[in-house]
Amino acid sequence: MEKCAKIYVAGHRGLVGSAIVRELQRQGYENLVLRNSKELDLRCQQAVQEFFQQERPEYVVDAAAKVGGIGANSTYPAEFIYDNLMIQTNLIHAAHETQVKKLLFLGSSCIYPKMALQPLKEEYLLTGALEPTNEAYAIAKISGIKMCEFYAKQYGDCFISAMPTNLYGINDNFDLQNSHVLPALLRKLHEAKVNQAPQVVVWGTGTPRREFLFVDDLANACVFLLQNYDQPEFVNIGTGSDLTIAELALLMADIVGYRGELVFDASKPDGTPVKRLDVSALNSLGWQASTSLEEGIRKTYAWYLENAGNM
């Protein structure tokens, strides 16, 4: 991928897209095409087709998606499946029609069956029932993976897919109702510290195990795949290690400096009991994560403190 290559990053203002833009620029890629949702509604097929015909990007990264935590997925399943299906379908097909050199589609580790063996290998896709709380999002993302595979098979398009584990980091969503567990808990702990609250309530039992990847590491992996990978089979992106939600809460409380009690609300859903990716395929290609969980959370908290007033 030449430094002058024209690269379109869809979803560049989100957690993932903004990190990919930062990484591309860090590596010297400056010919980036960027549009926000007001400038280009990716759910509109005609608008997407006209954009691709006009701009003719050589490379495309699909980091655009409607995302959220358990609460949002459970409350708005129709929006999650519709918006994500429309976004990715329009992007993939337009990339095909304009003969894009390579497209990278980003999914999520929630595509795997709820009770799949651990760690999650790429071959476990579609071998069992999905986790009900994020089924709509997972089905959309599985469709995107398969669409890329089938376009590669039928047309020879170089459309690749990657499945990140749970992400966090700079430019995350810290909404208490609709965000993922790590940013929501970070905000809860910070506000409890400021308000000297005696306790913080954590959703669920605290026993589920989760893997977390700093978003800047993900961005580095994505650029690595754009430069070095051209197979239709999707690859996992993660750290290969996990911890319980209770352990995460304790670590975050220590980083934030909150000294109160952590109370686990078992009436709230836990989601999948264990979710850890097998990242041996990506490691064998020569990439592995470099940011420890503690280091990543400290960087995220520092960014949150600087930007909380603007949220």
Image: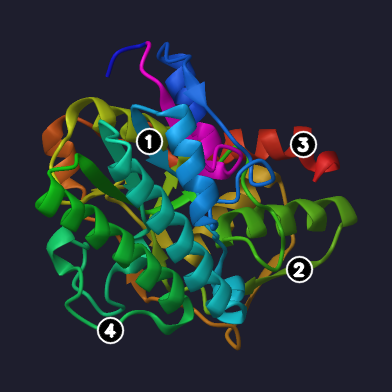
Whole-Å distance between the Cαs marked 3 and 4?
40 Å
Mark sitting earlier along the chain (3/4): 4
Q: Residue at x 73, y 59 (%)?
A: 188
* Dot 3: element: helix
Residues at circles 2 and 3 in contact by the CB criterion of under 8 Å: no
Q: Which numbered marker is on residue 307? A: 3
Give the amino acid at mark 1.
Val
Whole-Å distance between the Cαs marked 4 and 1?
31 Å
* Dot 4: element: loop
Q: Tell me the residue that label 2 is attached to.
A: 199
Q: Quadrant of residue 273?
A: bottom left
Q: Residue at x 17, y 60 (%)?
A: 121
Give the amino acid at mark 3.
Asn
* Dot 1: element: strand
Q: Return the residue nearer the eye: 52 or 245.
A: 52
* Magenta region includes residue 15: yes
Whole-Å distance between the Cαs marked 1 and 3?
29 Å
